[in-house]
Amino acid sequence: MNIQAALINVSLLWLLTAPHEFAHAWVATLLGDDTPRREGRVTLNPLAHVDWLGTTILPALTSLLGGGFLGWGKPVNTNPSQLRWGLKGLALVALAGPASNVIFAVLLAVLSVWMTKFSPAAALYFKYGVRLSLYLAIFNLLPVPPLDGSKLLLAAKIPYFIYAELARFGFVLLIVALSVTGLGLWMSTWSYEATAQIFRVLRAEL
């Protein structure tokens, strides 16, 4: 029962979800779709982007029981017919989320290095946030609905019935992939290596 890991993961997921979903909403608005603005999603307020099951309950349980980490924010609704460039615009909206995770990871790394002088515990917390942010960027690029990577399948114009079938079993596919394959370990390894590279650029120890 890893209570500390559960608290850290959930608090960081709240922190990381806001810029991720905001990025989706902001880019969709820039491309002409006012749906996110009408639904109050063009904001950095975490409460606007929290899905209580995906952002709190499930990540807490999976972390608490040592079963890895699984979580998500409240999806941002978009209307491809209103987006400039249609499905290509949808792809840009989808990529904005993972891109924001990478940018936020760099900002957290800078904050971690700065906090080392004042609070080693806070520095360690933000350092873990860097790795989790990069992990979420990789995770969200998986081409499985409802993850961001699945929108790239639509932009590639795969037959919609294939996408619909993937959407029906998307959650199960993710659970199985993370449970019985090396996918989770691969994503964790890549996020660790990317974190190490960021800190090397900042001339700081991981």
Image (cartoon, rainbow, N blue to C red):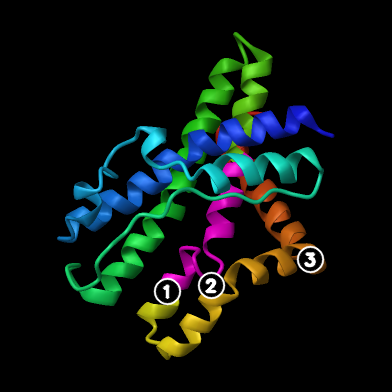
Dot 2 or dot 1: first in sequence order is 2
The residue that disc 2 covers is: 143
Q: Is label 2 in a helix, a strand or a loop?
A: loop
Q: Which residue is mark 3?
A: 182
The residue that mark 1 highlights is 152
Residue 94's disc is none
Residue type pointed to by label 2? Pro
Residue 203 is at least partly visible in this image? no
Seen from this angle, which residue lies furthest right? 1
Q: Residue at x 53, y 53 (%)?
A: 137
Separation of residues labelled 2 and 1 (CA atoms)? 7 Å
Give the SS element for disc 1: helix
Region rendered in magenta: 131-152
Give the distance between the C-alpha atoms of the residues marked 2 and 3, in whole angstroms: 17 Å
Question: Residue 190's x, y, as percent?
Answer: 67, 55
Q: Amino acid at mark 1?
A: Leu
Task: Say if 18 sits above or below 86 in the image.
Answer: above
Q: Which residue is depicted at the point 57% across and 51% down?
A: 136
